[in-house]
Amino acid sequence: DAKTTQPPSMDCAEGRAANLPCNHSTISGNEYVYWYRQIHSQGPQYIIHGLKNNETNEMASLIITEDRKSSTLILPHATLRDTAVYYCIVRVGNAGNMLTFGGGTRLMVKP
Amino acid sequence: DTGVSQNPRHKITKRGQNVTFRCDPISEHNRLYWYRQTLGQGPEFLTYFQNEAQLEKSRLLSDRFSAERPKGSFSTLEIQRTEQGDSAMYLCASSLTLGGVDTFGSGTRLTVV
């Protein structure tokens, strides 16, 4: 699976949009971009995933660049409960094989 | 369905003892994964099952680690002769083979003293 690069930490004001970047310049055509988050002392939680089109669900939006070498996870109105480590992962296929986690981005939402 | 359940939540053991953790996946999920997470790091893949078949076990950290899923439902992860370096969070996840996403349990935190 391709390697991802994320900033180690970010801050965001409560109520503002949180934009978390991820670089995956070696992504292959059959690799999806997944985002998970992990709140302290809990297991990772699935947020969203996509192949090449932008995706939106009730939690977040995923913007993938046209060349697919980078993506941005957007939390439209961050709350204190969004404080977590966010992991960007690329993997072959639409589910079914293991996830390879990097260091993630520690997002701190501040009042 | 209450999601993926892991027991115990916490385990403290003395060095050299054997420990076993249990994972109950979401009932219709046929894939089950084990990960280990040490402090400040992302989860690290250990092994996975499709139904009762263990399809990947080369990432198990040593021959002291073993996992089973005897009837394709719950799974156990055993660590024999524990060492202090085994102290970590052990996470279980499950998914459907096609089109599903991975749902994680809350993990078992192991402390080896």
Image (cartoon, coloured by chain):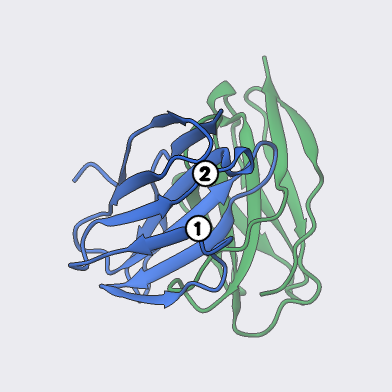
Q: Position of residue A70 (x, y in %)?
A: 76, 65
Q: Residue sitting at 58 percent across and 45 percent down? A: B37
Q: Which residue matches tag 2?
A: B82
Viewer-proximal residue among A57 and A44: A44
Relative to B5, A35 lies left or right: right
Q: Nearer the viewer, residue B83 or A63?
A: B83
In this view of the protein, can residue A56 be seen by the observer?
no
Q: Which chain is blue?
A: B
Q: Position of residue B4 (x, y in %)?
A: 31, 47
Which chain corresponds to the colour green? A
* B74 relative to A29, above or below: above
Q: Work out whether disc 2 and disc 1 sit on a shared chain.
A: yes
Q: Label 2 is placed on what type of residue?
A: Thr
Cα–Cα span, label 2 and label 1? 8 Å
The three-letter code of the residue at mark 1 reads Arg
Above or below, comparing residue B30 to residue A78 in the picture: below
Residue carrying label 1:
B64
Label 2 crowd bin: few (<14), some (14–19), many (20+), radius 10 Å: many
Name the subunit of mark 1.
B
Q: Nearer the viewer, residue A5 or B38?
A: B38
Instruction: Look at the numbered disc 2 and give the secondary structure of its residue.
Output: loop
